[in-house]
Amino acid sequence: MLVRLSGSLRGTLGARRRQPADDWSPGANGSEAEHLFLRALALCRMGDSQAAINLLRQATAVAPSFADAVEAEGEVLDMSGDSAAARGRYEEARQLRQKGRAGAPDRHFVLRQIGSHTAEIVSYTRVLKSLKKYALPNLARGNAYLADRQPELALADYERTLKLHPGSMDALALKAEALSALGKYAAAIEDLDKVIAANPKSSDSLSARGIAHMALGHVDQANTDWRRQLELLGGRPAASAYVALRLADYELALPNLETMVRNDRRDPYWELYLRTAQLRLGKAPSAMQSAVGDEWVASLLALQSKSASQEDVMARANTAGRRAEALFQLGVASHASDRNAARAYWQQVLDLGQPTLVEHAAARNELSRSAS
């Protein structure tokens, strides 16, 4: 695999270096760990297995959850004849991927992917060296870039795809997702209008258009799209629960959340969202159904049960997304006794949270409802 993928390193690294300097910070796309990973592939191709292993270990020291680097080390060990050590690295990579949390289940499958997609990007870049005039490799690499949270590069690939295959509604829908990720919501809606006109049953496109509308404050249009999406989901509990939460329709969300708490003990957010719905409906929160393995979600559950303070939880909220989640829960906790405080918290969610967050849509619906 390493020999096959390493052929396009020069082009891929060149593309990375043309990105803003921020993309090279540790932990972000184009990070030090990714650079080490790519250099290791090149060294493996030249036959220097030990140097490749050393670089891959440096990559995982920088980014311990970088499953691609762990798996690649297993590949090199396998090719070097150390199959026992290789099996250990394969198992570690498998466990790392299981720990990752997939994207929201009501979104396009590309946006539900987890982990790094560096190896895929390298592979598709190599394919494109000889198949530049084919739409499919451009689309596939765009998907890998979008899953890797690099929407600008994804957009360029989708635009090339559409030049080669102008009638591709799949490419147009994904182009809209990239535009939306770049904050170009009006342009995204324009493309999604075309996709939905061609296929009114495109659940993913209705989801995307709803998010773009909500980002622009078009609450009624967003909710219309999401209610139509709910009809098309046919009662699938995971996706339906998320759409209902975006609508802040807790009665609708509740049975789907109860199903997911029973069916998916690995994701503690189901329990958090179930208790959120119960609190907003004035019901007593259910007893904890599972051990929480996620420290952040555990802190939000503790906030709900009043065993953690606002100050403690906000001190742990080390990203804008986490701050938005915590502020939303503070609004939920305040609503019964102080609606003005709840509205103030939810307004902060809109100021901090990305429109893709469930909490962003729910907060905007809560505020819209209280203002009417």
Image: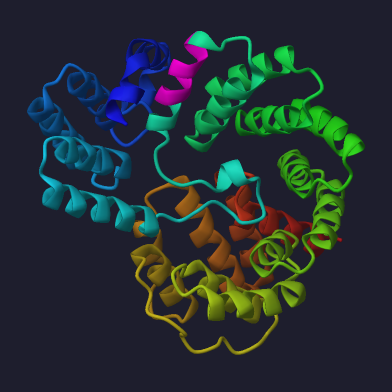
Q: Is residue 256 above or below residue 142?
A: below
Give coordinates of residue 110: x percent, y percent: 58, 41
Magenta span of residues: 122-129
Closer to the camera in the image, 122 or 181: 122
From the viewer's perspective, tell me whether residue 261 is left or right of residue 280.
left
Give coordinates of residue 344: x percent, y percent: 62, 58
Q: Quadrant of the C terminus?
A: bottom right
Closer to the camera in the image, 152 or 169: 169
Q: Is residue 236 visible?
A: yes
In reply to whether residue 128 is colored magenta, the answer given is yes
Residue name at image x 34 percent, y 66 percent: 295
Residue name at image x 79 percent, y 30 percent: 169
Give coordinates of residue 216: x percent, y percent: 75, 38
Q: Quadrant of residue 92?
A: bottom left
Q: Quadrant of residue 298?
A: bottom left
Residue name at image x 24 percent, y 43 percent: 70
Q: Is residue 151 visible?
A: no
Give coordinates of residue 231: x percent, y percent: 85, 62
From the viewer's perspective, tell me whether residue 93 is left or right of residue 274.
left
Q: From this viewpoint, which residue is outermost toward the left? A: 50
State the predominant SS element of the stretch in magenta. helix
